[in-house]
Amino acid sequence: MLRELFFVLFDTSHFDTGIKITPFSGAHIVYILLIFGSILLLWWKNRAKSPEQKERVLRFLAYALVLSYLSDFFVHDFVYGGMKIDKLPFHICTVLCPLVAFTQFNRHGKRIAEPIAIMAILGPLMYLCYPASVGDGEPWCYQALQTMFFHGVLLAWGVLSIALGAVTPHIHHSWKCAVFLCCETLWAAFGNAILAHNWFFLEEDALYIGLVANGIIPKWSLMIINPIVFFLAVLLVYGVVHLIRAKANPKQPLAE
């Protein structure tokens, strides 16, 4: 009886409305506004608070991120009919979950705080702009809520780590993101090899338009193309961060 109840609770459709989160649909835009609005509100409420309060905000977000990620595995049977291996920590966003926890709660984590914060902005931002794997459920079903919540919290942690001053990025440290992307490429390739999946889109292009399947590009080239494209996006994030800092503090140098 309890098992049947859980299948009902975690069903992808409760009202048969036919509404889904598709890229740039109304539901997608509402989620984007809620996520970005929440991040802006958290920053506004805490921008002038003590360092201890700012740290509490970041710790809360890290706890929420880990809880959302780990608890999700306990309900895969009700949502997906079994283990959904796409949720394993081989994608950028999923591998960032344990890395964010390490950065936030381990004293040695500060050494990697800058690249993790930058990637915690870039990874979920890319996903939230084009949520291709959010599923066919209604926007208020568990699958949609958990997926958007996880990426939203990850983005909030990355943005607020910088906006609240816990991390001060400098573009001459961008090589650390390049190292991260090389490691992520090898890690995802390992996952793909043992579990026959498409983590970090190394088996087929991110938009699934068939660049590999149709023989337009060789599969091995994705191990070069993907990290390069991501690194160019990293440089763009650094550029935006430095521009905002320059506008906010025109007398403060961008590099130390």
Image (cartoon, rainbow, N blue to C red):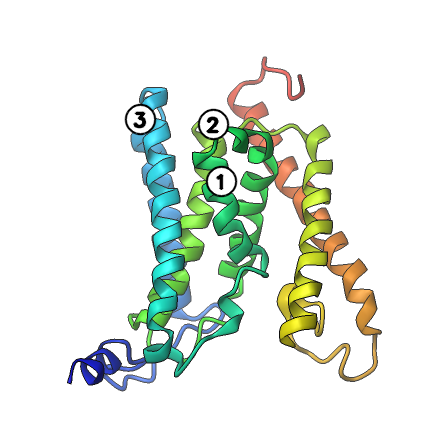
Q: In this picture, is 160 found above or below 63?
A: above
Element carrying mark 1: helix
Which quarter of the picture shows residue 193? Answer: bottom right
Residue at mark 2: 166
Q: In this picture, is 141 found above or below 96?
A: below
Which quarter of the picture shows residue 240? Answer: top right
Pointer 1 or 2: first along the chain: 1
Q: Amino acid at mark 1?
A: Phe
Residue at mark 1: 102
Residue at mark 3: 53
Q: Residue furthest top?
A: 251
C-alpha distance separating marks 1 and 2 = 15 Å
* Residue at the image point whose x is 66% and y is 72% from the top: 194
Q: How many marks?
A: 3
Q: Residue furthest front?
A: 194
Query: Badges 3 and 2: C-beta atoms under 8 Å apart?
Result: no
- Mark 2, Cα crowd under 10 Å, few <14 / some 14-19 / many 20+, is some
- Mark 1, Cα crowd under 10 Å, few <14 / some 14-19 / many 20+, is some
Pointer 3 or 2: first along the chain: 3
* Observer able to see residue 132: no
Q: Is residue 147 left or right of residue 49?
A: right
Element carrying mark 3: helix
Q: Amino acid at mark 2?
A: Ala
Q: Position of residue 143 (x, y in %)?
A: 36, 71
Quadrant location of the C terminus? top right
Q: Amino acid at mark 3?
A: Gln
* Observer able to see residue 56: yes
- Mark 3, Cα crowd under 10 Å, few <14 / some 14-19 / many 20+, is few
Q: Position of residue 100 (x, y in %)?
A: 49, 43
